[in-house]
Image (cartoon, helix red, strand yellow):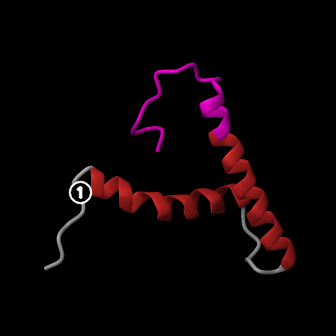
Amino acid sequence: MSWLTPEKVNPLSDKRTSKFVALALFINLIKIGMERGDFEERDPLLAAHTVLGMINMPFVLYHTGRVVAPV
């Protein structure tokens, strides 16, 4: 979502770093699930971005007014 809300802070700030830490933790969680056999073997980074996209995109679409009303 950072492409929608550009940060006016230093790109190496703690706020930006914490986003990468959260992504790394999520990737690690997916890797653990793959090792246990709970998830199919896939690229963990791609899987993390896919899941986060499914979570975040409804909010992005709603707040930008791009959600189409049901017929």
If the image is split into quadrants, where does the C terminus sit?
A: bottom left
Front-lying residue, 60 or 34: 60
Q: Mark 1 points at which residue?
A: 66
Q: Which portion, as a residue range, is magenta? A: 1-18
Q: Is residue 53 above or below residue 17?
A: below
Name the quadrant containing residue 6. Answer: top left
23 relative to 4 in the view: left or right: right
Residue found 17% across the figure and 70% down from its top? 69
Q: Main secondary structure of the magenta part?
A: loop
Residue drawn at (72%, 67%) of the image: 42
* Quadrant in which residue 52 is drawn: bottom right
Give the residue type that dot 1 points to: Arg
* Residue 7 locus on image (x, y percent): 47, 27
Q: Disc count in the image?
A: 1
In the figure, residue 47 lies in which quadrant? bottom right
Q: Does the magenta stretch include residue 69?
A: no
Lateral position of residue 41 relative to residue 13, left or right: right
| Residue closest to the far top | 10
Q: Is residue 11 magenta?
A: yes
Residue 38 position, x and y percent, is 77, 80
Could you tell whether 52 is left or right of 24 in the image?
Answer: left
In-front residue for pair 32/13: 13
